[in-house]
Image: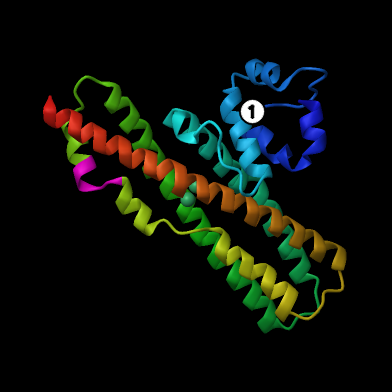
Amino acid sequence: MAQVIMEHQQLIPLLPRFNIKMGFGHKSVEQVCQQYGVNTCFFLEICNSYIYEDYTATKDLSLFSLETMVDYLKNTHHYYTAIAFPALEQNIAELISDSELSIEKKDLVFNFFNDYKRNFLEHIQKEEEIILPYILELEIQYRQEKADEYFIRKVKKYSINDFALEHDRLETSLTNLSKLIIQYLPPFENWVLCHRILMDLCRLVKDLTDHGNMEDKVLIPRVSELEHSLLQKNREA
Ligand SMILES: [Fe+2]
Ligand SMILES: [Fe+2]
């Protein structure tokens, strides 16, 4: 495990999402995963898709339980809201406040950032409070011999495909923030902080792209399939 992380240090932010702590000694990836109760195949699939842009999962991600995927997505949300985003916000506030920008330009950046932050938090809140609990319940109801009536009504009323239609991508607007700094604002005196922010933005955009792909390309089709099977099974029962 130590060798993998040394060679691919971009994986470091993934570790807390699996509650894995460093100090690996000579333990293998499998031994570390066992120690922390993590599904080794799932961990490797996530690492590979994180490192290699056009990686196609060898073990189809859809073979893992929805609960495993939901846990990972929740931990990723926590990383965004508790760690990555507050750090970015603090650095941007420092860069802009201490800069020579006009009041109008400062307001432009702050307004842009605050609008993005509001959308971002609403997006995550909706997934945490409505979508992910619904998916966990769907998996439980599917395992029952007969699903509860109220749940069948719920699936018929609002399916995951309705959510898919309104599910937007969080990385797009964030890229515009980098563009604003690189292309349109005058240069910043504190270029060290400015460059750090741009590198953090670049990493966060990549992370959000992976996250969105997992939701759109793996989770949603899988949930849709399960909804379909649940309705079918209960029609026959
Ligand atoms: Fe999400
Ligand atoms: Fe999302």
**Residue 220, quarter of the rendered image:** top left
**Which residue is located at x 36 percent, y 36 percent?**
135
- Which SS type dominates the magenta stretch? helix
- Residue situated in front as seen by the camera: 218 or 94: 218
Return the x and y of residue 46 as percentages of the image width and height: 60, 36
Q: Quarter of the image containing the N terminus?
A: top right
Classify mark 1: helix, strand or loop: loop
Q: Quarter of the image containing the C terminus?
A: top left
Does any portion of residue 129 appear in the rendered image?
no
Does any portion of residue 7 appear in the rendered image?
yes
Residue at numbered disc 1:
19
Left or right side of 85 for 188: right
**Which residue is located at x 56 percent, y 33 percent?**
58
Return the x and y of residue 96 as percentages of the image width and height: 74, 70
- Residue density around tag 1, few if under 14, some if 14–19, many if 20 or more, within 10 Å: few
Residue 26 versus residue 186 in the image, above or below: above
**Which residue is located at x 77 percent, y 31 percent?**
4
Range of residues picked out in magenta = 155-159
- Residue situated in front as seen by the camera: 16 or 2: 2
Residue 139 versus residue 117 in the image, above or below: above
**Which residue is located at x 24 percent, y 32 percent?**
230
Residue 210 versus residue 151 in the image, above or below: below
Name the residue type under label 1: Asn
Return the x and y of residue 102 as percentages of the image width and height: 73, 83
- Residue situated in front as seen by the camera: 119 or 208: 208
Say if the magenta span includes residue 108: no
